[in-house]
Image (tube, helix red, strand yellow):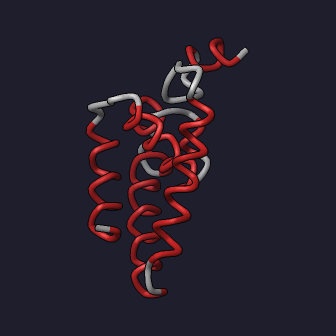
């Protein structure tokens, strides 16, 4: 079932570790948001929401670049990005989102 959905573009990777990596992505985003002051947290969330809307809501390009499940919201988008990073992806959309996270957390 998982591999069939992965081949249909639902998930970003076919790895059997995909679910674990996505949960790491959710935990990482939670850490990022919780470690920031409220104003910076708002800025981070707004940046991620902007990237999400630009790639999934306005143009729908993100579905092809990342995955179908990423279109749900910015949290799912970040979880898929972390999965791809842990799977050694060189996707430009992944790099863009990681750079935003780095700008706020590092």
Specify whether 51 is left or right of 90: right
Specify whether 50 is left or right of 20: left
Specify whether 50 is left or right of 57: left
The image shows residue 50, relative to residue 82, as above or below, that is below
Q: Residue at x 53, y 20 (%)?
A: 15
Q: Dividing the picture into quarters, in which one does residue 84 lie?
A: top left
**For this rendering, which residue is in front, 63 or 27?**
27
The image shows residue 91, relative to residue 54, as above or below, that is above
Instruction: Please state the total of marks drawn on the protein image.
Output: 0
| Residue 94 x, y percent position in the rendering | 34, 42
Q: Residue at x 57, y 52 (%)?
A: 26
Residue furthest out toward the right: 1
| Residue 89 x, y percent position in the rendering | 32, 30
- Quadrant of image for the C terminus: bottom left
| Residue 61 x, y percent position in the rendering | 40, 37
**For this rendering, which residue is in front, 31 or 98?**
31
């Amino acid at each position: 079932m998982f591999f069939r959905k992965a081949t249909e573009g639902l998930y970003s990777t076919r790895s059997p570790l995909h679910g674990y990596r996505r949960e790491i992505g959710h935990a990482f985003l939670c850490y990022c948001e919780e470690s920031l002051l409220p104003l910076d947290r708002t800025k981070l969330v707004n940046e991620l929401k902007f990237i999400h809307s630009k790639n999934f809501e306005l143009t729908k390009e993100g579905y092809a670049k990342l995955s179908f499940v990423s279109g749900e919201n910015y949290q799912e988008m970040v979880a898929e990005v972390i999965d791809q990073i842990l799977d050694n992806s060189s996707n430009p959309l992944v790099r863009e989102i990681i750079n935003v996270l780095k700008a706020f957390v590092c």
